[in-house]
Image (spheres, rainbow, N blue to C red):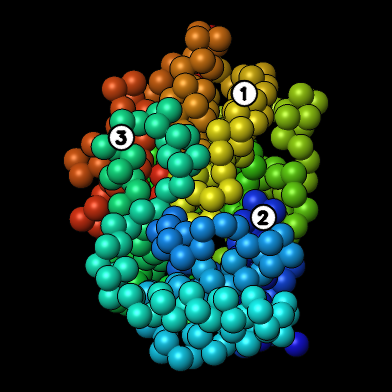
Amino acid sequence: MKNSRELSILLLQTILENKIFASEAKSKIIPHDCPDQAFINMLVQTSLRHLVYIRSIIKTFIRKKLPANAKEASYALILATTEVLYLNTPDYAVINSYVEIIKKNLNKYIAGFINAILRKICTEKERFRKEDCNAFFPQEFRRLLNLSYSKNTVSAIEQASVKEPMLDITVKKGVTIPDSQTLPLGSVRLSNNGNITLIDGYSQGKWWVQDFSSALPVKLIPELKNKKVLDLCSAPGGKTAQLISEGAKVTSVDVSPTRLQRLTENLTRLQLQPENIICADAIKWLEDYEGEKFDIILLDAPCSATGTLRRHPELVHIKNIKDVDTMTKIQKQMLNNIPSVLKTDGLLIYCTCSLSKQEGEQQISEFLHQHPNFQTVLPHLPPELKSLQTTEGWIRILPSHLKDLGGADGFFIAILQKRD
């Protein structure tokens, strides 16, 4: 049985080498009954937030890469440095634990090498803490953002993203949550980032987890009562729940059976039921659809998800420009199949949790050019959110926005109306 630090090493290695989300890696590596899940999550997430700086520190002590068969030692060094600098674990506990792991899993010579480096890092830890300038973005991710924003804006995004965000939830009408902050348009923010099932009202289905930015698209739809709504790429169901709560007749479509299972479980807890739940590829489903056209189509398009980097710090290390290019093509196919299933005067709400303008502003500019019978509908925003509106009438949210309220996920939203 691997201990918590061994599991953390394996988890970090799996995320970075396979370029997958932490949640996917955890499902493969961490046992469901592991009692140390909270510690493992905190350790790995913290290491990912500070990985650029930690690697620069380690590089000053290791001039050459460790042998390929000693990769585990590299990840052990990263996590050990994380504990020393950011988790305040006693030096002796860090050194003893990680040296023993390397000795057991590799050999005593590499363990001795790791021991020497860790002792040097511990000796100079106060200097390293003072010199930390919160570098979060590796160069490849910075290049991705530089395609859309100025260097100053990228720097602002970086500084706003390095801190772990608070928990946002959407509550049912009439529900109040103790010790919470109400954000513009009604999202509720909590400082609690622990076990969400222990928060008041969870088991009664009074609320669901949903970031402020993710909740905004549905909140901006002017009228939903009895409207026939198509929620594309709907799982895990936050927006579906919003739509149903406002009286819409919702058809939810998603390609993933696993994610749709989560949607069903979430809606069951919330005591909400859509008209239809369909497991299908959205592009093929739109192409084959022959039923009554929809009043509203919400496309929360598959994307690079770079806007969620506050909650998923691994993103900056696993996503690149190629990922954006791939997702842009899929989004374009989905958008081009929507006009035929939307009623005249119907609304298309397009949104992505991406920071890339290629997946947002540029995507919608091209769609409007190719579909002149669609036009932008200006959203009704309260004064404190007016700064989020672009000159075109769309919405662009960056993690550096809403700083006084604690920030938000990166997001893009466009509301379009189909004309004759």
Instruction: Evaluate if marks 2 and 1 touch, with contact meaning CB atoms under 8 Å apart.
Output: no
Residue marked by disc 2: 17
Give percent across and percent down for residue 123.
35, 80
Please state the horizontal and vertical placement of residue 102, each as a whole percent of the image: 65, 80
The answer to which image quadrant residue 129 occupies is bottom left
Observer-nearest residue: 333 or 289? 333
Q: CA distance from mark 1 to mark 3?
A: 28 Å
In the displayed structure, 137 sits above or below 415; it is: below
Residue at 40% across / 32% down in the picture?
146
Q: Of tags 2 and 1, which is closer to the observer?
A: 2
**212 in relation to 105, above or below:** above
**Who is closer to the viewer here, 251 or 298?**
298
- Considering only order in the chain, which callout, 3 or 1, is on the residue closer to the N terminus? 3
Residue 47 against residue 184 in the figure, above or below: below
**Which residue was labeled with disc 3?**
151
Earlier sequence position, callout 2 versus callout 3: 2
Which residue lies at the image location 57% right of the left edge and 87% below the top edge?
97
Question: Gap in Å between the C-alphas at discs 2 and 3?
Answer: 28 Å
Where residue 176 appears, as percent x and y from the top left, is: 34, 71
Three-letter residue code for mark 2: Glu
Question: Whole-Å distance between the Cαs marked 2 and 1?
Answer: 30 Å
Query: Residue 104 location, x and y as percent?
Result: 71, 85
